[in-house]
């Protein structure tokens, strides 16, 4: 009897153990999140490189894979792989490391889609890098991989030196010394190209023209009298990748407008009850700003008695003495600083 009770007890223990393994939540794998919470994959991962490393940017996803709106992203998982160029195998799996957690947040700000940014440093020369990112809605709902970006990192080249900008006639001529060394002092072996940046007045700098190996440029896209600022950046070009290097000092230049407007014509001076009314024909030209009116008394030289801004071509001299033998002449001036003034028109004597 004792052996029978022992067998029954053992059977109970085995059954209980089996229930422990098959009970609980009902499955052995991690739970699969529903499509309504999984963020859509990021498809605009992009990068820029400079002498400090690489900056990655991407747009926050705003929908789940089922099309539901997402108000906030918990975080992003950024994956990075580093392979020596000599060891790179195009057909081998990319050896991504553990994900780097990048903080998330609201997907929009003031009605605009938010952009995430991550600066990656400590890059090694002659190494190929791969990056991809996933959006995470919570600890268990991670989106699919984004597009993958890849590039080969090289030590950045130093900034160009000796940048000059010289106004010559109707254009500005720029030149600089080539950059021949890398940031660590070693010779630059890759192709070095230069990107010129331009600013008119107080505007922001914008890239002007395409990057090239030339160390001089002529800027004929100018407005006379406007001050322009320039700077140039050296870059190394390796295959399809361009690596930003050092930026030069800023220089300024402007082409002065020394061409006066045409001389006003058909000037007439007519006596009125209030003085003398002077009229003339308008001078053509986009930069004509106005007119100066001069009066000459008998036996004396000309004196300026008034200024009229365009589009007006009439002036009344209320200071004229009745019966005086005056002569009048008109000049045109432009918008240059200082303004250019035309020669005086022919004299117009007072008509009764």
Image: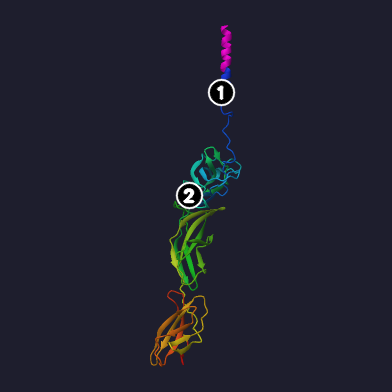
Q: Magenta residues?
A: 1-13
Q: Which residue has dot 1 on it? A: 20
Residue depicted at x 49% and y 42%:
101
Q: Position of residue 313 (x, y in %)?
A: 49, 82
Q: Give the answer, above or below, for where 285 lies relative to 67.
A: below
User: Can residue 343 be seen in the rendering of this structure?
Assistant: no
Element under disc 1: helix
User: Which of label 1 and label 2 is nearer to you?
Assistant: 1
Residue furthest toward the front?
273
* Residue pointed to by mark 2: 53
The residue carrying pointer 1 sits among few (fewer than 14), some (14 to 19) or many (20 or more) residues within 10 Å by Cα, namely few
Q: Position of residue 27 (x, y in %)?
A: 59, 29
Whether residues under marks 1 and 2 lie with C-beta atoms below 8 angstroms apart, the answer is: no
Q: Mark 2 falls on what kind of element?
A: strand
Crowding at mark 2 (Cα within 10 Å: few <14, some 14-19, many 20+) = some
Q: Is 239 within the magenta? A: no
Q: Quadrant of residue 320?
A: bottom left
Q: Nearer the viewer, residue 219 or 332?
A: 332
Residue 10 part of the magenta-drawn span? yes
- Image coordinates of residue 161 in percent, x first then y, are 44, 60
Cα separation between marks 1 and 2: 53 Å
Main secondary structure of the magenta stretch:
helix
Q: Decide if residue 211 is on the left or right side of residue 293.
A: right
| In the image, residue 142 above or below residue 156 | above
Which label's residue is closer to the chain start, 1 or 2? 1
Q: Is residue 108 visible?
A: yes
200, above or below 295, in the image = above
Q: Nearer the viewer, residue 81 or 194?
A: 81
Q: Residue at x 50, y 56 (%)?
A: 235
């Amino acid at each position: 009897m004792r052996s029978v009770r022992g067998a029954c007890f053992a059977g109970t223990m085995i059954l209980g153990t089996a229930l422990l393994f098959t009970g609980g939540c009902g499955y052995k794998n991690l739970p699969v999140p529903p499509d309504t919470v999984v963020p859509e994959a990021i498809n605009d991962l992009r990068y820029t490189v400079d002498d400090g490393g690489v900056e990655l940017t991407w747009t926050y996803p705003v929908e789940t894979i089922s099309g539901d709106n997402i108000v906030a992203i918990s975080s992003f998982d950024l994956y990075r792989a580093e392979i020596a160029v000599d060891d790179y195998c195009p057909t081998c799996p990319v050896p991504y490391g553990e994900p780097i957690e990048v903080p998330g947040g609201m997907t929009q700000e003031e009605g605009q889609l938010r952009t995430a940014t991550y600066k990656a440093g400590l890059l090694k020369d002659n190494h190929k890098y791969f990056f991809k990112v996933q959006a995470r809605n919570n600890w268990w709902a991670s989106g699919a991989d984004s597009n993958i970006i890849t590039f080969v990192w090289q030590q950045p080249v130093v900034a160009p030196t000796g940048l000059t900008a010289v106004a010559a006639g109707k254009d500005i001529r720029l030149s600089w010394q080539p950059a021949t060394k890398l940031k660590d002092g070693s010779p630059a072996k890759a192709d070095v190209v230069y990107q010129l940046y331009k600013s008119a007045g107080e505007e922001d700098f914008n890239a002007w023209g395409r990057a090239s190996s030339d160390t001089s440029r002529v800027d004929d896209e100018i407005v006379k009298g406007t001050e322009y600022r320039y700077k140039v950046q050296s870059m190394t070009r390796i295959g399809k990748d361009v690596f930003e290097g050092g930026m030069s000092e800023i220089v300024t230049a402007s082409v002065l407008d020394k061409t006066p407007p045409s001389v006003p014509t058909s000037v007439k001076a007519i006596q009125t009850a209030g003085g003398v009314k002077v009229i003339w024909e308008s001078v053509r030209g986009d930069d004509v700003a106005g007119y100066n009116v001069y009066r000459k008394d008998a036996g004396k030289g000309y004196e300026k008695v008034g200024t009229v801004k365009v589009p007006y071509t009439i002036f009344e001299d209320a200071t004229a003495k009745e019966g005086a033998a005056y002569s009048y002449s008109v000049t045109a001036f432009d918008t240059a600083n200082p303004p250019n003034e035309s020669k005086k028109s022919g004299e117009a004597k007072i008509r009764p």
